[in-house]
Image (spheres, rainbow, N blue to C red):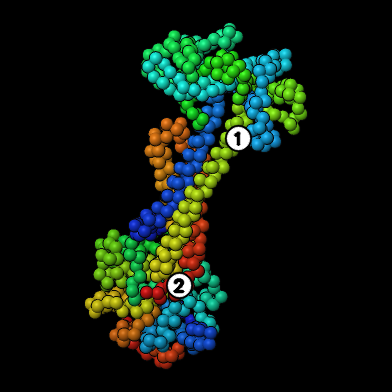
Amino acid sequence: MGELLRLRGVKKTYASSEQVQVQALRGIDLRVLEGEYLAIMGPSGSGKSTLMHIIGCLDVSTAGTYEIDGVNTAEMNEKALAKIRNQKIGFVFQQFNLLPTLSALRNVEVPLLYAGVPASQRKERARQALERVGLADRAEHRPGQLSGGQQQRVAVARALVTNPSLILADEPTGALDSVSTADLLDLFDELHEAGRTLVVITHEADVAARAQRTVHLYDGLIRSVTTGVAA
Amino acid sequence: MLGQTIRTAIEALSARRMRSILTLLGILIGIGAVMLTVGLGQGASDAIASQINSLGSNLLIVTPGSSSSGGFRGASSTASLTEADVEMLADQAIVPDVVAVAPIASTSGSLRSSTTTWTSQTTGTLPDWTKVRAREVESGRFFTQGEVDSKSSVAVIGSDTATELYAGASPVGSTLIINGQTFTVIGVLKSEGSSLSGSEDDIVIIPITTLADRFTDGTITIDTIYLSAADSDVLASAQQEINKALLAAHRVDADNADFSVSTQASLVETATSVMGILTLVLGGIAAISLLVGGIGVMNIMLVSVSERVREIGLRKALGATPSLILQQFLVEAVILGLTGGLLGVALGFGGAALINPMLTEQSVSISISTSATLLALGVSMAIGLVAGVYPASRAARMAPIDALRSE
């Protein structure tokens, strides 16, 4: 299996004021293989959000290198990063982050829009993605008309629709009840079985337990790596 | 892609319908006000031009006083035109391009018919008056040179004067008493409509010799001499001939001229330039409200950007480049501006349609030209664009994590 993500000595320093500098990440080395299901855990302030931002190309590191699919992101400008996010990464957020005025289908279409996919194909591909998450019959509903679990499934469909190299989920179950959480984790398992690479950031042990490997962060460093229940 | 951006922008605007409408209102009122004021200015200057044109074709006007040395000097020499000047200007050998001459002397006075009294200006002139002023007699006839020579007590009256004094009955042949002197009405003029200087239809015309004989102790004070050029091509040469002849007769050089010769065209030009300034002032005031409308658009776009930081962050996470985000917000601002502009143009036309019937008395109407309409739309679009640039670039520059993080 090939290597999808490669982080070498990644550091991130924020200047919270003139004098005070916060070291959110203090040298992370991490490899994620294609098709792997990885969880990143850690208490708040451990740097897991910062790591998620860097893996998601939402932010760049202050030191070290990060390669995704063999492409080094360190030197990239905002436009190139936007392209990487669009083509290689599918995001799932804690708060779903759907656009409230658009139907589920049109929400799923948004990444295709930025990829420049023509309208006819957009609709078809968005419909397939919704079908994949079991929400084909909710395509015309707006987020407000869907339950939390359904909204998160729409978000997963949106993450899948561009056929990205990586599904990156940030606390995906944080706003869900236990039934919806179980459904979502089952969906993640299915995606993993279908060969998808998943990186899930969470602070819940039972969520992390579904992954093959769990990286534990503490104070901006990887403290330990455990192997979870093999899928 | 742009089509999709426009669709997204319309969706975003209609999601905040009330606010979008209120923002539109600023642009709408501004554009509407500019169109109405500029249209009114245009209409007024059209009206003045047409009234000046209606003074008569190929008209030249000689007035006492100087036009080249300022008004005050001119005012002191108001009696500089004489009967001899009129005779000279009627001489084809001296001014070959002039075909008709009509001096004007006037007095105001009370008019009395057998039933009512009325007050109006009484004008003394020559038979050529109808020719130079392009007026026609509706019923009866105008007076003749013979009646001028014999100082006959005949009068031609305007249609309004006729209505006031004779209340519908035919005035021709009736007696008209002007300041105690008895005249016979021999004709009624065809209606001309009102001008800015008053009704052209409330006048009494009598031979100039009669006016002098009965009302001014035999002296003739000429207010104005109206002349007709043979046709519009010789208007300029006629103006020169008149100027030359009068300078010679008055024994003055051009710098000390005690009269001025103007043409219809020069009057139109002056009036139009005055109206142009007025229009500019009014339009400027209206433009300020447009500016306020533009600031409104910028304000609302800024609010919209700060309200939608999460959306911006999400769109960026999903792959929107900074230039696409910039485009999206710019398009929203331009749509606001353009829609406001379109509605403003509609307001302008609607307002004009509503106000024009009320203006018929003033013989002025609001006239909105196609070029003004296109300009208004262009301006409203530009306002949207300019007002949108700052908010949109703020949105585009936003870092995706900062945007996503905000709650």
Q: Amino acid at mark 2?
A: Pro
- C-alpha distance separating marks 1 and 2: 62 Å
- Residue B53 in percent (x, y) is at 55, 26
Can residue B125 be seen here? no
| Nearer to me, B126 or B6 | B126
- Find numbered disc 2 in the image and state the secondary structure of the residue it sits on: helix
- Find numbered disc 1 in the image and state the secondary structure of the residue it sits on: helix
Q: In the displayed structure, would residue B5 be above or below residue B370?
A: below
Q: Nearer the viewer, mark 1 or mark 2?
A: 1
- Residue B136 in percent (x, y) is at 50, 16
| Nearer to me, A120 or B355 | B355
Q: In the displayed structure, would residue B76 be above or below residue B301?
A: above
Q: In the displayed structure, would residue B204 be above or below residue B363?
A: above
The residue located at (48%, 40%) in the rendering is: B39
* Residue bearing mark 2: B400
Q: Chain of mark 2?
A: B
Q: Which mark is residue B270?
A: 1
The residue located at (58%, 15%) in the rendering is: B213
